[in-house]
């Protein structure tokens, strides 16, 4: 936006040069008077824009501080990536730079004054637009720090990650066993080990590049980590079979296909988005905050995401090339790996909170109505039992225990009904 403002200033001043030569007629109402008046207008606009930009930056920092302390520091990246905040700051800084550049073109002199009428009017229009942007920003920043809005944005990342990594809908024919995984051990009896040289979180795995490398070198790669795992320098990250095909160029190319950074990313790490919702819920249930309603909102959003995951096919751990030959064996995200940590952490924090416990059982029941794999249903049954057991041990009021018992019975009824379902689902 700053570069666009500089280009616009150059074009506007050139238009004023053309108008001064008589090629363009500037309407009388667009005249801005003397050079001193034009300078005053541009100076006022430039000064006010840079001042407002500082205020906007300060408000953004306040929002960041509030979000960091209440919802967790890992949510700061959501605010930093907010295109609205970037657009607002860009508008004010660009208007400031435009006014500054046009001000330089004003030339009072004995041979004749040069007043860029067109350029000054454009600056006024930009200032009026900036006022509208400021009003919108005040509304946006007050909305963006609300708990429900923050949770909704994180939940959207979770849903987008599930759609991206699990694109296939689950049909009636449920795959039972990953045949490639059962044979993979024999493939790597004679395998070379590639160790990590960097430390940090694995953010991106360029699977297409790895597939081409494995195909061109006639090898099979087994990844020991997946996006979201922490990588320690010197630990094995990839096994390559056969070892006789390994060259230094292949090792460097494989390492370059694994992007390691200081923090986790939701680009390929769908678990990270779910863990962010869990972090918000756990913080809300802490004694210092004690906000069960925020925790219940997180549970609702997690249930929605897990329902979406339950209806998707889990991809195979073995990836084939165009000829149908196995080339990559990598760990995959399963339903249990997504659901179990989330339910466990919230259950442990909410064991003495009746409302959150009931909502957690409701979420398990809703997700249970969507599952079609027996293994997924068993995961939900196990965690429903754990929630019920924790509540029974922690709650001392009989009415509370009876409420949990009723909700637990309803949840188990739904899960058992799904287990015996034979009719098709549309």
Image (spheres, rainbow, N blue to C red):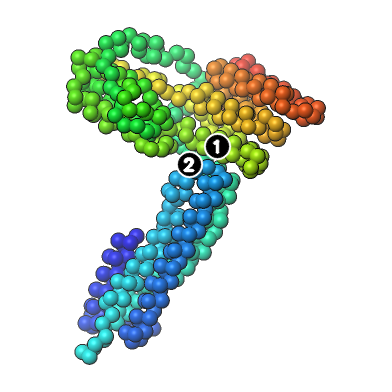
Residue 206 appears in the picture as rendered: no
Q: Secondary structure at mark 2?
A: helix
Image location of residue 150, percent across then percent down = 54, 46
Question: Which numbered dot is residue 279?
Answer: 1
Image location of residue 273, percent across then percent down = 49, 36
Q: Residue at x 32, y 72 (%)?
A: 100
Q: Residue furthest right?
A: 398
Contact, CB < 8 Å: mark 1 with mark 2? Answer: yes
Q: Residue at x 32, y 65 (%)?
A: 5
Question: Which numbered dot is residue 74?
Answer: 2
Image location of residue 351, percent across then percent down = 67, 29
Q: Is residue 297 left or right of residue 317?
A: right
Q: Secondary structure at mark 1?
A: helix
Which corner quadrant holds the C terminus? Answer: top right
Q: Is residue 104 left or right of residue 342?
A: left
Which corner quadrant holds the N terminus? Answer: bottom left
**Picture quarter containing residue 332?**
top left
Q: Residue at x 20, y 14 (%)?
A: 244
**Picture quarter containing residue 263?**
top left
Picture layout, residue 65 above or below residue 72: below
Nearer-N-terminus badge (1/2)? 2
Circle 2: is it few (<14), some (14-19), or many (20+) Cα within 10 Å?
Answer: some
Image location of residue 219, percent across then percent down = 24, 18
Picture layout, residue 129 above or below residue 314: below
Q: 376 and 281: which one is in front?
A: 281
Q: Residue at x 49, y 26 (%)?
A: 312
Picture layout, residue 123 above or below residue 4: below
Circle 1: is it few (<14), some (14-19), or many (20+) Cα within 10 Å?
Answer: many
């Amino acid at each position: 936006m700053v570069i666009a403002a500089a280009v616009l200033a150059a074009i506007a001043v050139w238009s004023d040069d053309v108008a001064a030569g008589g090629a363009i007629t500037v309407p009388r109402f667009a005249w801005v008077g003397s050079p001193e008046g034009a300078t005053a207008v541009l100076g006022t606009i430039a000064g006010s824009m840079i001042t407002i930009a500082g205020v906007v930056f300060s408000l953004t920092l306040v929002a960041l501080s509030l979000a960091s302390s209440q919802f967790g520091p890992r949510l700061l990246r959501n605010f930093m990536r907010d295109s609205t905040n970037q657009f607002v700051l860009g508008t004010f800084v660009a208007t400031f730079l435009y006014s500054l550049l046009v001000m330089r073109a004003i030339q009072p002199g004995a041979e004749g004054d040069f007043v860029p009428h067109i350029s000054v009017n454009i600056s006024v229009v930009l200032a009026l637009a900036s006022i509208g942007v400021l009003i919108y920003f005040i509304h946006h920043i007050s909305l963006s720090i609300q708990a429900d809005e923050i949770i909704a944005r994180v939940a959207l990342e979770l849903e987008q990650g599930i759609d991206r990594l699990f694109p296939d809908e689950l049909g009636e024919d449920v795959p039972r066993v990953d045949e490639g995984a059962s044979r993979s051990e024999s493939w790597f009896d004679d395998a070379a080990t590639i160790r990590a040289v960097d430390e940090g979180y694995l953010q991106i795995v360029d699977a297409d590049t790895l597939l081409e490398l494995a195909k061109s070198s006639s090898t099979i790669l087994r990844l020991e980590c997946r996006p979201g795992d922490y990588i320690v320098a010197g630990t094995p990250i990839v096994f390559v079979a056969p070892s006789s095909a390994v060259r230094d160029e292949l090792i460097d190319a494989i390492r370059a296909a694994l992007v390691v950074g200081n923090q986790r990313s939701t680009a390929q790490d769908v678990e990270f988005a779910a863990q962010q919702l869990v972090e918000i819920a756990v913080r809300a249930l802490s004694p210092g905050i004690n906000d069960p309603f925020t925790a219940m909102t997180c549970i609702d959003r997690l249930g929605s995401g897990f329902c979406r995951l339950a209806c998707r096919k889990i991809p195979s751990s073995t990836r084939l090339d165009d000829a149908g030959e196995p080339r990559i064996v990598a760990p995959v995200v399963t339903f249990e790996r997504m659901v179990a940590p989330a339910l466990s952490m919230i259950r442990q924090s909410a064991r003495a909170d009746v409302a959150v416990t009931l909502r957690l059982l409701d979420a398990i029941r809703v997700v249970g109505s969507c599952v079609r794999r027996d293994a997924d249903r068993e995961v939900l049954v196990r965690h429903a039992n754990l929630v019920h057991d924790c509540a029974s041990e922690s709650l001392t009021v009989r009415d509370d225990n009876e409420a949990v018992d009723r909700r637990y019975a309803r949840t188990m009824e739904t899960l058992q009904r799904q287990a015996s379902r034979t009719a098709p689902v549309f």
